[in-house]
Amino acid sequence: MATKDINAEIQDRIAAFAEELSGLVREAAVEAVQEALATGGATRAPRKPGRPAKRSAPVRRAKKARSGKRIRRTQEELDALADVFMAHVKANGGERLEQIGAALNIPTSEFKRPVQQLIKSKALRTTGVRRGTVYFAGRASGPVAKRKSKSKAR
């Protein structure tokens, strides 16, 4: 008989707990609905970490104005730029391309072809790799001397 009383008491407590719990859930739901109606439903649930925010519309970026085709420089222009580069390297050996460009006030992108020609003709010696490359004067006098010797050999 004692077990029937204990079982009945357990059932009563479970029922009371379930009733109290459902009342709390109802109150929380009513509060959430009232809050959503008061703010116009504009609130969003916070995003989880690592999940990117949803974009409403793609962002259009302005394109750079292009002048058309690439500028094709003549060999004389390349040689003149190579001479300016070599003069600076002879005076200030051991500088990186960024430093040379800043000192001469010329964008480093304009030096790419002349520097390749100088290295190929061994007028320019390099040490290091990529951005750590430093330039020194080499053995030959420049790309012009190399090209002239080729033209005589033909």
Image (spheres, rainbow, N blue to C red):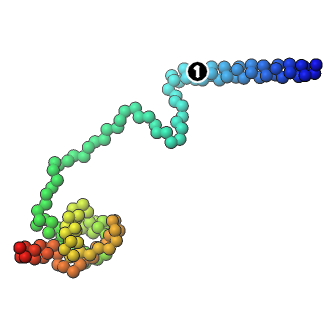
> In the rendering, at what x and y percent does residue 8 appear?
86, 19
Residue 3 shows in the view: yes
Disc 1 residue type (three-letter): Val
Rendered-image quadrant of the C terminus: bottom left
Q: Is residue 47 above or below residue 80?
A: above
Quarter of the image for residue 74 reads: bottom left
Rendered-image quadrant of the N terminus: top right
Position of 44 with respect to 70 (left or right) is right
Position of 39 with respect to 9 (left or right) is left
Q: Element at badge 1?
A: helix
Quarter of the image for residue 88 reads: bottom left
- Residue at the image point whose x is 77% and y is 23% from the top: 17
Q: Residue furthest right?
A: 1
> In the rendering, at what x and y percent does residue 6 appear?
88, 22
Position of 51 with respect to 117 (left or right) is right
> In the rendering, at what x and y percent does residue 114 appear?
19, 67
- Residue at the image point whose x is 22% and y is 68% from the top: 115
In front of the other: 89 or 119: 119
How many numbered marks appear?
A: 1
> In the rendering, at what x and y percent does residue 22 appear?
70, 20
Residue 92 shows in the view: no
Q: Residues within 10 Å of mark 1 (few under 14, many from 20)?
A: few
Q: Which residue is mark 1?
A: 33
Q: Is residue 150 above or below residue 19?
A: below
Q: Is residue 66 above or below residue 81?
A: above
In front of the other: 122 or 42: 122
- Residue at the image point whose x is 26% and y is 63% from the top: 108
Q: Is residue 115 above or below residue 27?
A: below
- Residue at the image point whose x is 24% and y is 78% from the top: 137
Q: Residue furthest bottom?
A: 139
